[in-house]
């Protein structure tokens, strides 16, 4: 398969490239040069996109402005990059004869669906309630992707969980309910390339959670007791290291639809975080950077 991958120099783009390049021809496009990028151009560049789409079977669109840009980049630029560029790419991909389009989105767009003082179980049927221009622009992009889907142009949206370097105690705990490893994000994208469902499908991708929906009431008030029941080995590691636990957990992202329908499995859980931390991996930040 010949695949155009936008945002190929970014952290997620590089992971996706690594997961696909051995079996597919991956054309990386990014405005920043990197070994995984063949075409150095902005995702808004129509001419560059037309050239990159020549003969392409599928598009994976990861290029976007993200949460760290909020407050630093004008909202109009979010509209240009996250929404208008997505609309243009969808149009050009269909014109070029591509048959599959995968849009990388985010669980962050659930926003206000997470209620302070409670714990919300979140799956694909949960209504997003965006808070920032980042959330709103990604939700708009999803809507454009859904509208573009047809029998000859299948579209998949992947709402990925929290996935960036953090201190080990935060990252390890997040892997149980809202975080995901970049390699698991990449394998989820690979799975969506082969999804033979309807014209449009949307999935959440998050780390494997031991929690059940009925745990939410207790998770909202007593993290330790739920961990003692559902993840005792991780709790023992936290105690052994003297790491504190938050008193509550406010959300659990449920990726079972992706697991059950496509056979995808996240493979890098909290144990992997601890191993990376011990090895000094740049994927895990030093504990000195942990926020209070």
Image (cartoon, helix red, strand yellow):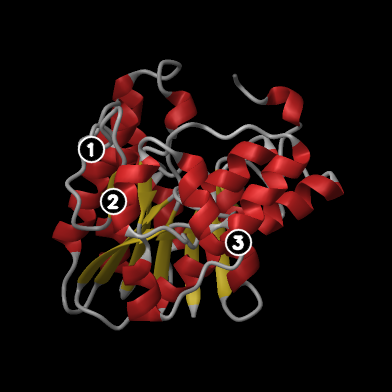
Q: Nearer the viewer, residue 287 or 66?
A: 287
Answer left or right for 110 relative to 185. left
Q: What percent of the width, then of the height, locates residue 180?
A: 53, 53
The residue at which mark 1 appears reads as 113
Q: What's the residue at 18%, 59% (across, down)?
A: 146
Marks 2/1: CA–CA distance: 9 Å
Instruction: Please state the horizontal and vertical placement of residue 167, each as a whole percent of the image.
Output: 67, 35
Residue ID at (77%, 39%): 241
Is residue 7 something one can see in this rendering?
A: no
Q: Position of residue 57 (x, y in %)?
A: 40, 76
Residue under pointer 2: 122
Above or below, comparing residue 130 to residue 14 in the picture? above
- Residue 48, can we see it? yes
- Element marked by disc 2: strand
Q: Quick check: marks 2 and 1 in contact, CB under 8 Å?
A: yes
> Residue 201 lies in what quarter of the image?
bottom left
Above-or-below relation of 264 to 91 = below
């Amino acid at each position: 398969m010949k695949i155009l991958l936008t945002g190929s120099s970014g952290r997620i783009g590089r992971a996706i490239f690594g997961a696909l390049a051995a079996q597919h021809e991956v054309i990386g496009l990014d405005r920043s040069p990197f070994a995984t990028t063949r075409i150095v151009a902005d995702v808004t560049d129509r001419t560059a996109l037309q050239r990159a789409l020549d003969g392409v079977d599928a598009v994976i669109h990861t290029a976007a402005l993200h949460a760290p840009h909020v407050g630093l980049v004008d909202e109009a630029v979010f509209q240009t990059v996250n929404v208008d560029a997505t609309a243009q790419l969808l149009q050009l991909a269909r014109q070029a004869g591509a048959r599959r389009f995968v849009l990388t989105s985010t669980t962050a767009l659930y926003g206000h669906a997470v209620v302070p003082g409670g714990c919300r179980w979140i799956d694909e049927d949960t209504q997003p309630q965006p808070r920032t221009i980042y959330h709103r622009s990604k939700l708009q992009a999803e809507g454009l992707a859904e509208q573009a889907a047809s029998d000859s142009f299948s579209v998949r949206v992947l709402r990925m969980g929290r996935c960036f370097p953090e201190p080990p105690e935060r990252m390890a705990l997040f892997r149980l309910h809202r975080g995901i490893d970049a390699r698991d994000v990449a394998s989820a994208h690979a799975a969506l390339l082969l999804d033979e469902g309807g014209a449009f499908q949307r999935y959440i991708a998050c780390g494997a959670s031991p929690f059940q929906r009925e745990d939410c009431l207790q998770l909202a008030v007593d993290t330790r007791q739920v961990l003692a029941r559902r993840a005792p080995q991780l709790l023992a590691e936290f105690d052994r290291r003297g790491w504190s636990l938050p008193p509550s957990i406010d959300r659990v992202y449920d990726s079972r639809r992706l697991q059950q329908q496509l056979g995808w499995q996240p493979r890098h859980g909290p144990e992997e975080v601890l191993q990376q931390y011990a090895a000094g991996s740049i994927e895990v930040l030093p504990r000195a950077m942990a926020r209070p």
